[in-house]
Amino acid sequence: MFELISQRYERGSTMITSNLPFDEWTETFGTERLTGALLDRLTHHVNILEMNGDSYRLGQSRARKAQART
């Protein structure tokens, strides 16, 4: 992932979605140094959209289960 972001850095748009806050990314990428470098590149020229709400997929799953019961 770091290589991909490094290659794309300041060359084009990249969209990343995550359900984790930035301070939990270290658990995914292993080291604070690597995670910090990755986030530095990601957040340099950025628009962060934080969306909170019900999961679209969870809603669809519940609707299918409800239909199956009827």
Image: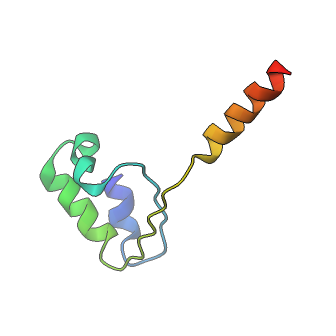
Q: Which residue extends farthest front?
A: 70
Vertical position of residue 23 compared to residue 70: above or below:
below
Point out residue 4 in the picture as x, y percentages from the top left corner. Answer: 39, 58
Q: Which residue extends farthest right?
A: 70
Comparing 67 with 26, the one in front is 67
Comparing 65 with 39, the one in front is 65
Tally of numbered discs: 0
Quadrant holding the C terminus: top right
Point out residue 16 in the picture as x, y percentages from the top left corner. Answer: 46, 59
| Residue occupying the point 15% across, 46% down | 31
| Residue occupying the point 27% across, 60% down | 38
Point out residue 17 in the picture as x, y percentages from the top left corner. Answer: 47, 56
Comparing 66 with 30, the one in front is 66
Vertical position of residue 20 compared to residue 15: above or below:
above
Q: Is residue 63 left or right of residue 33?
A: right
Point out residue 27 in the picture as x, y percentages from the top left corner. Answer: 23, 41
